[in-house]
Amino acid sequence: MNTKGEKINVQEITKHCRVLVIEQLMAYLRADINVFWSWGAHAFRVDNMKNPKMFRMLVQGHHHKGHVYIFLNGTDLFDVYFTTSQGIIKDLKTDLYFDQLVEVIDNRIERIPDYTD
């Protein structure tokens, strides 16, 4: 369940997740604001405002157009699912440390080899 080609089941994933601190997550994502906005990120959503376990955004990047779901798994590492706008999982990255989050997301959504740092 919750593998490539399947429809994402948020309820199943969140059963094994920890509560996200949305302000902290947004600070991680916006650490390099130019990279963040290059994703065309919008339509932000959480599953529960009091105890959020899922963060979702819609992106319009060079490589990926669709949703990006972010969860904090039981080991305090991030799991990121890249889905179509209909929720079909195209890719997933698991067990990411906070300092890997932006780079991994950017590589999947937008980054091309011609970019320079």
Image: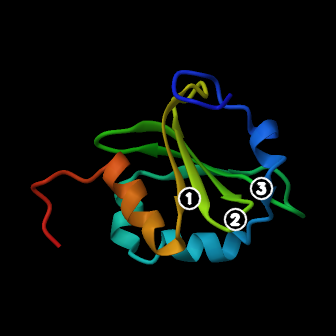
Depth order, front residue of 59/9: 9
Depth order, front residue of 77/35: 77
Q: Contact (CB < 8 A) between labels 2 and 1?
A: yes
How many numbered callouts?
Answer: 3
Q: Amino acid at mark 3?
A: Cys
From the viewer's perspective, is 50 left or right of 26? right
Determine the CA span between mark 2 and mark 3.
Answer: 9 Å
Depth order, front residue of 113/77: 77
Which residue is disc 2 drawn over?
75
Residue at disc 2, secondary structure: loop
Residue pictured at 79% horizontal, 48% vertical = 14
Say few, some or many: other residues with alpha carbon within 10 Å of mark 1 (under 14 / 14 to 19 / 20 or more): some
Residue at disc 1, secondary structure: strand
Which residue is disc 3 drawn over?
17
Residue pictured at 17% horizontal, 73% vertical = 117
From what the image shows, is residue 117 above or below residue 70?
A: below
